[in-house]
Structure formats: structure tokens, C-alpha cells
Amino acid sequence: MTTDDGAPAPVRVVLADDEAMIRAGVRAILATDPGIEVVAEAGDGRAAVELVRAHRPSVALLDIRMPKLDGLSAAAEIRRLVPQTATVMLTTFGEDDHVARALGHGASGFLLKSGDPRELIAGVHAVADGGAYLSPRVARRVIELGGGRLARRPAARDRTAGLTDREREVLALVGAGLSNAEIARRLHLVEGTVKTYLTSIFTRLEVRNRVQAAIIAYEAGLVEE
């Protein structure tokens, strides 16, 4: 999407967190990037859903713990009512069970509240462009939930063994958080071909979304750290 003068339109974001100080901090970080615009804020999950329905943003940035409707339930409602809006969860290290649940419900990204501000900006842009984004520390923690990365690596490598070399390249870049357009540029492909590869990868790995695929890429050792 572009503006009237041909410049790229900013990524429109709805921000939801029940702590006003957290919302102010996140908004201030996002405001440093002219390519991002926070169009509305909510203090609970129910209000977040209604604001997303009203504003139709590219990204909904949701705290996991909120009153009236928690972030996971709000994300599920948003995906049902406004599927074109990508959902990104704000997490802390004490919420492993919530992160694991969210993986199964199609969230496009996970960001730490205490993480590098650059990760917040990069994550919003990545999911707005159709990518997935995992804060590196969140990714490492999530793959440890099943018993440790090394213990899970043989199984992940078995799952990726049936992929072609090109499909493994694409999967590694998904794990690194690149969007379809970025993958296409990196591999000198057209974007439609990348989408075809992703469809095949998701089917072969039996996953539903980019984040689940990204976790397998991490577990299989395909992503450089």
C-alpha cells in the first residue's frame, strides 16, 4: 500500500496492554520509525478486538495477560473476524505455557517486553510484510520447552529430510524472520514461487503457519544465530 505521493504507507498498528506505562513505552519505540503508525490503544483484550475491527490495522500487538479477554483469546477472535490483521504477542520469560499455546493458534510473532527496541520495530515490519518474527531469546526458550534443542534436533532434521535443497533454503529464511518478498530477493526468485515453496513446506512438515515452521527451522539447526 502507498500514500497519495507514491511513498509506502506506514504499517498501522493497534497496541493492547493493560499497563499504561508499557503502552507508552512501546508507542514511544514505534514512534521512532516513520514507517509505523499506532492508530489505537486498548487496555484489555475485548477493547483490542473492537479496535481492530474498527481500524483494520496490519498488525495487532497484544499483551498475553489482559483483563476481560486475554491476549491469546483476543488473537483468536481477531484472526476469526479480521484475518488480514497479523497478531504479535508481547511476552515475558515467565509465560512459557502461554507461548506454547499461542504457537498452536497461528500467532505471527513473539516479542519480549524487555527485549531490544530494534526487535520490536523489526518484528512489526516483518509480520506486516507477511513474515514471522520470533525474538531470538523467545525462540530459544520455546524450543527448550520440549526437552532441549539438542534433544529435539534429530526429530526436526528427520522432518526436514524430505525437503528439497531449495525448500530448506526457504525454510531457513522463514526461521530468520524474512518476509516472502525478502526471501524472493535473497534467492533471486519471484514472490509467487516463494509462496509455492511455502505451501509445499507447510504440507511436508505438517504445520499450519510460519511460526511453527520457523521453530522447526531453529530446532533443525537451519538458522544461523
Image (spheres, rainbow, N blue to C red):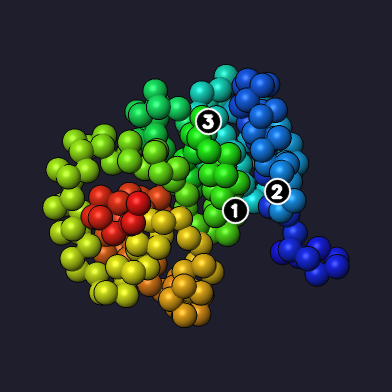
Q: Locate residue 38 relative to residue 107 in the image: left or right.
A: right
Which residue occupies 47% across, 31% down? 91
Relative depth, front residue between 171 and 205: 171
Reading the image, the residue beneath label 2 is: 33
Which badge, 1 or 2, comes first in the chain's sequence?
A: 2
Which badge, 3 or 1, comes first in the chain's sequence?
A: 3
Dots 1 and 2: beta carbons under 8 Å? yes
Q: Residues within 10 Å of mark 2 (few under 14, many from 20)?
A: few
Q: Position of residue 79 (x, y in %)?
A: 54, 45
Reading the image, the residue beneath label 1 is: 125
Real-space CA distance between mark 3 and mark 1, rounded to the nearest whole angstrom: 17 Å
Report the mark closest to the observer, 1 or 2: 2
**Relative height, residue 188 to residue 64 (above, below):** below
Give the residue type that dot 2 points to: Asp
Give the residue type that dot 3 points to: Lys
Q: Residues within 10 Å of mark 3 (few under 14, many from 20)?
A: some
Dots 3 and 1: beta carbons under 8 Å? no
